[in-house]
Image (spheres, coloured by chain):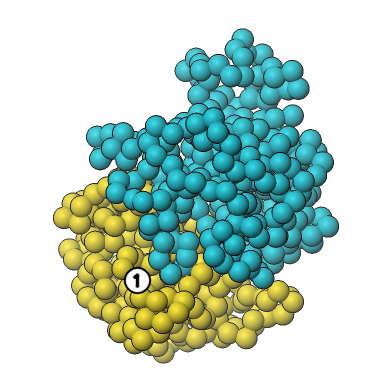
Chain colours: A cyan, B yellow
Amino acid sequence: MRHARIIFEGRELDVDIDAQDRIITSEGETLDVSLDSDQITWLPPVKNPGTIFALGLNYADHATELAFEPPKEPLVFIKHANTLTGHKQVSYRPDNVEYQHYECELVAVIGKQGKNIKREDALDYVAGYTVCNDFAIRDYLENYYRPNLRVKSRDSLLPMGPWIVDTADVPNANNLRLTTEVNGKMTQDGSTKDMIFDVPFLIEYLSKIMTLNPGDMIATGTPHGVADMQPGDTVVCTLEAIGSLETRIVSEQDYYGDNY
Amino acid sequence: MTAKTLVKSKLICVALNDKAQLAALEKTFNQAPYKKPPTEPVLYYKPHNTWNVNSAEIEWARDFEGQEVPEMVVGASLGVVMGKETCRVSAEQALDYVGGYTVVADYSLPEQNYYRPDIKGKCLDTTAPVGPEIVPAEKISNPDELTVTISVNGQQKSEFKLSNMQRSVSELISKISYIMTLQPDEIIAVGFAGDRVPVAQGDQVETSIQGVGTLKNTLGGA
């Protein structure tokens, strides 16, 4: 089963989506709308977002692309809900930057509180999986707590969704094709099998440091094949067996409107 | 996470905002991996699992082998509590967006380097007590003139005048508000003395700002 949060006909709804793509509300009502309808506004799928852990350099080929040695220990950084937006929403490109790239990633959503979780038990703590696009603005990188918040904590630059797929419906999250298309052209084609630190490892690692809570998310990093984005571009990040997350890039002025 | 935490949704800390610390580390920061001193505020989060309250015990951390760590330290900061949504404000306007002030303590492993996010050092459970209360903004005429002290078992170990911060409260609010839209009750810990104070198991720690309050916590593990 898939689980999403949407706005439809003015109502904010927690919905399930079944194998026939029917959208069913928590009251059991089947909505008379198709999954690809523009009448649906997609919200970030985690209702009460906790801590968002994101991984840097977690695919060997991407680390090489950025001229780094693959890490011997996870490179983890933290994000908060201000960065989240949903499927078919917009993200912005800051003014006067040279290079902003997408990062298509598998996300594990924590469903149960735990500390010192063993690798072999880790998936019991995962409610499900979703897709995110963890945008980065390379111009803003500084060598202090890198990747620094100015790069990775900006409003709207973590689209997530469209939905969460139950863990049981993804038998092997370590072997999923991961692709990105920009304006219909494929620019990234990898597999989660090339991840350096997989989801069970990361859960064991993080939970040795701290308590993980329901609503926490782990964005597991991106493989080789990142590219610059410009306002007007549409980027679609796809994880096999999970879903496709579409984002349109707008300018900073368009995004902030009266606050610009 | 403690139920009655004063933090709502976000606790942002500013590192390396003590002028004396930046001066002392200047040579280091001109070498690899830093290559040059920071040009923007150096920020980190204390996430949900760290949030704690006045009078509560701070857990003594354990390492990856499950052994108690040999050393923990504490820093203290003025906590600036946002009063309304704060998006892209100038330094001149910034203080109009502050709802109140409080004290933030940051217990952690010793700060050994600043190159990568310090998840292992900074994200330990219960290590960010905030309180004891939020003092309304109008009670503090100039937050940059406050002094933050840390006492351990009744002895003062650290005194930090916020006039020695590299960036002022209003400048930090402005800078951060251009990175992310701040929401009411989100808190910024604006600056810590460069020298963090070592603490031991069972220590009673008071972090204090005159006019704002005193946060009292005890280290666990004793």
Type of amino acid at the residue the image marks with label 1? Pro
**Along the line of sight, the residue nearer the viewer: A257 or A68:** A68
Residue at point 21%, 72% (across, down): B145
Q: On the rendered structure, is A93 left or right of A211?
A: left
**Along the line of sight, the residue nearer the viewer: B197 or B172:** B172
In this view of the protein, can residue A176 be seen by the observer? yes
Q: Is residue A202 above or below residue A127?
A: below
Quadrant of the image occupied by residue A71: bottom right
Say what secondary structure mark 1 lies in.
Answer: loop
**Furthest-top residue in this view:** A32
Q: Which residue is mark 1?
A: B38
The N terminus of chain A sits in image quarter: top right
Q: On the rendered structure, is B20 left or right of A178?
A: left
> Which chain is home to disc 1?
B
**Structural crowding at the residue carrying mark 1, measured as other residues with C-alpha within 10 Å and reported as few (<14), some (14–19) or many (≥20):** some
Residue B219 x %, y %: 56, 78
Quadrant of the image occupied by residue A141: bottom left
Residue B139 x %, y %: 22, 60
Residue A35 x %, y %: 62, 19
Q: On the rendered structure, is A18 left or right of B46?
A: right
Q: Is residue B116 above or below residue B6?
A: below
Residue B195 x %, y %: 40, 84
Residue at point 63%, 40% (across, down): A179
Residue at point 38%, 57% (across, down): A139
**Along the line of sight, the residue nearer the viewer: B146 or A129:** A129
